[in-house]
Image: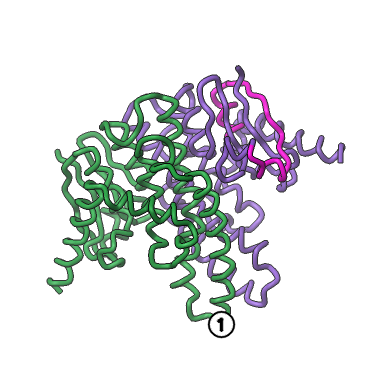
Chain colours: A green, B purple
Amino acid sequence: MAIMISVFEASPDRGRGLARDMGVRWALEEVGQPYDVRLLSFEAMKQPAHRARHPFGQIPTYEDEDVVLFESGAIILHIAQRHAGLLPVDPQERARAIAWMFAALSTVEPPVLDRETATFLIRDKPWYHEHLAILEARVRVRLDELAERLGDADWLDGAFSAGDLLMVMVLRRLSSTGLLDACPNLSAYVARGEARPAFQRAFAAQRALFIASQAKG
Amino acid sequence: MAIMISVFEASPDRGRGLARDMGVRWALEEVGQPYDVRLLSFEAMKQPAHRARHPFGQIPTYEDEDVVLFESGAIILHIAQRHAGLLPVDPQERARAIAWMFAALSTVEPPVLDRETATFLIRDKPWYHEHLAILEARVRVRLDELAERLGDADWLDGAFSAGDLLMVMVLRRLSSTGLLDACPNLSAYVARGEARPAFQRAFAAQRALFIASQAKG
């Protein structure tokens, strides 16, 4: 059985590669593993068949001959542990790369997502802009700390790892906000991630799917 | 060298065991590993000496004879991979337990923390209660989904694992909010976690430290 991942039938980001299947696709491309996709509508994601795979009714899920998994961070870690290319071999370096995976999802992403959620959840409130300023200040604290740590290195801790993959995925969510402009080394870091051939292949695959969904209807 | 973790000198939660060292202490107690603590003031956490261990100037950090780590999720995974007691031996079951670790931190915790952050960040705004209602509705969606999956099982996927440890830690943040009342099986799940002897030992250790800090200061 080939690897199968579930993805949006028509991604709400209109093919910009911000949906969470993008990181899983990128990881599979980095390690050279082919995969199939199961296309899901928003309605199908909430049905029992998919809830059995994903308790929170989201994408992506991952299936191989042995296991069914949900949570993009867990899926990427599983891929990285099974195939060479996304984690250092040395156990200490490996533990540190995994720490960056958790840092991306647990420390940097929450304020980024908080800000993003506000842009659709409370956009019509009279206090929207006042609250957005508060949320953006919190994002800036994390960006400054991350920029300080990255310095002029190419990647967060030695060679490119699954930690960088997830961190670039998180920072890409800010691309259209201008918030990265204050940290040129983080903008360059994101560009470096996006320039990787594996990223390009993953991006093209999810984008082709969105374009096909629009052509259909 | 014994395991060393860094913790708050005086925890802002006043010894309720909500700070992120609590999960690491709990994990170390579950696997029977002794540890020392390095006490940090809020000021010391932001200094270069600690930033070298933790780029975001937070607690906890973890040190053993081989590695220095940050991010409580990564630290707990590291402990669980080195010592028996927190992850199944079977590789597929292990991957699923790790998926629950990511689910706790990446899917359930963000809306919980969002709500909690609002209670101190925007408490004085005239629109505070209107926004709190929106944030609590998002928490309730996740709780309902989690309650549905847990059903009448004791733990999320077979035996108690690091995934349950992190999920209980996240849900404990809601203890004083009443939001768990609508899901009696989740309240019972949290109580089951808190009743574990390892939890009790970890809780007592962090609480004793808070009480000592009050006596001093």
> Does the segment drawn in magenta span residue B40?
yes
Mark 1 neighbour density, 10 Å: few (under 14) some (14–19) many (20 or more): few
Quarter of the image where the N terminus of chain A is located = top left
* In the image, residue A4 above or below residue B22: below
- Can you see residue A203? yes
Q: Is residue A7 left or right of residue A109?
A: left
Start-end of magenta stretch: B24-48
Q: Position of residue A50 (x, y in %)?
A: 28, 53
In the rendered image, which residue does mark 1 sit on?
A126
Quarter of the image where the C terminus of chain A is located = bottom left
Q: Between residues B192 and A195, which one lies in front from this camera angle?
A: A195
Q: In the rendered structure, which amino acid carries the disc numbered 1? A: Pro
**Which residue is painted at 51% across and 44% down in the image?**
A149
Q: Chain of mark 1?
A: A
> Does the segment drawn in magenta span residue B183?
no
**Which residue is painted at 58% across and 78% down in the image?**
A127
Q: Answer with the quarter of the image where residue B132 lies.
A: bottom right
Q: Is residue B185 left or right of residue A162?
A: right
**Which residue is painted at 45% across and 45% down in the image?**
A152
* In the image, residue A86 above or below residue A41: above
- Can you see residue B100? no
Q: Position of residue B56 (x, y in %)?
A: 57, 46
Q: Position of residue B39 (x, y in %)?
A: 71, 34
Q: Between residues B86 and B42, which one lies in front from this camera angle?
A: B42
Q: Between residues B6 and B107, which one lies in front from this camera angle?
A: B6
